[in-house]
Amino acid sequence: MAAQSDSYIVPDVLKSGLTTVFCGRAPSPESARRRAYYAHFSNKFWEILAESGLTEHQLNPEDYALLPRYGIGLTDINKTEFGSDHELTGSGDNPRALLDKIEQIQPKILAFNGKNNFRMFANEAYRIPKSTPVDYGLQSRLTIKLTEIWVLPNTSARARGYWNPTYWHEISKRHQEMSKL
């Protein structure tokens, strides 16, 4: 496992050998309260994992520690604050720490749950301006060593207007392919 901090609201689920690591910005207030990833009832994360075949059935948010058995890990850019993007101070944002974690454990895929999360990371890791347009799917020009980078529609209810499960099904297919390698 990657180094943990007692100040993390929800601990990372990271270790070597994972196929896909999903990365959000920060826990929601409900996730912080329950100390579980994507815990708000309206968040589609757990539903889309099952629907797309990434998990065999829909897990509960408190089951997040079971994800490595599916080759899946979880982390956030901000491990010390919680809330919606507009509620965060940004003092806990640490895309550099994310880059270091991914370089250390080397999953086959790093998937960002939302474009803004990816933009924050790409600005730090590749000096790509945050205003640069981003498409969903594989970011074929960017890697972290051998780790592919993907951007997925955010599963939060606040991003419902941008929801498209197609990309989640695509990453599930890629996850299955990469799990066999």
Image (cartoon, helix red, strand yellow):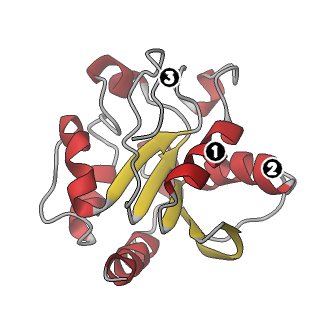
- Residue at (33% x, 76% y) in the render: 179
For the residues labelled 2 and 1, say whether their Cβ atoms are less than 8 Å apart: no
Task: Give coordinates of residue 14: x percent, y percent.
Answer: 40, 45
Discs 3/1, front: 1
Q: Which residue is mark 2?
A: 123
Categorize mark 3 by other alpha carbons within 10 Å: few (<14), some (14-19), many (20+): many
Task: Pick whichever, 74 or 112, lies toward us.
Answer: 74
**Is residue 52 shown left or right of residue 121?**
left
**Is residue 45 shown left or right of residue 166?**
left
Task: Give coordinates of residue 163: x percent, y percent.
Answer: 46, 61
Q: Amino acid at mark 1?
A: Asp
The dot on residue 1 is none
- Residue at (60% x, 71% y) in the render: 146
Element marked by disc 2: helix
Task: Give coordinates of residue 134: x percent, y percent.
Answer: 72, 66
Element marked by disc 3: loop
Using the numbered discs, state the Cα–Cα distance from disc 2 to disc 3 in whole angstroms: 22 Å
- Residue at (87% x, 53% y) in the render: 127
Of pointers 2 and 3, the one earlier in the residue sequence: 3
Of pointers 2 and 1, the one earlier in the residue sequence: 1
- Residue at (72% x, 45% y) in the render: 120
Dividing the picture into quadrants, the one containing residue 84 is top right
For the residues labelled 3 and 1, say whether their Cβ atoms are less than 8 Å apart: no
Using the numbered discs, state the Cα–Cα distance from disc 2 to disc 1 in whole angstroms: 15 Å
Task: Pick whichever, 123 or 19, lies toward us.
Answer: 19
The dot on residue 82 is 3
Categorize mark 1 by other alpha carbons within 10 Å: few (<14), some (14-19), many (20+): some
Q: Is residue 111 above or below residue 60?
A: below
Q: Which residue is mark 1?
A: 100
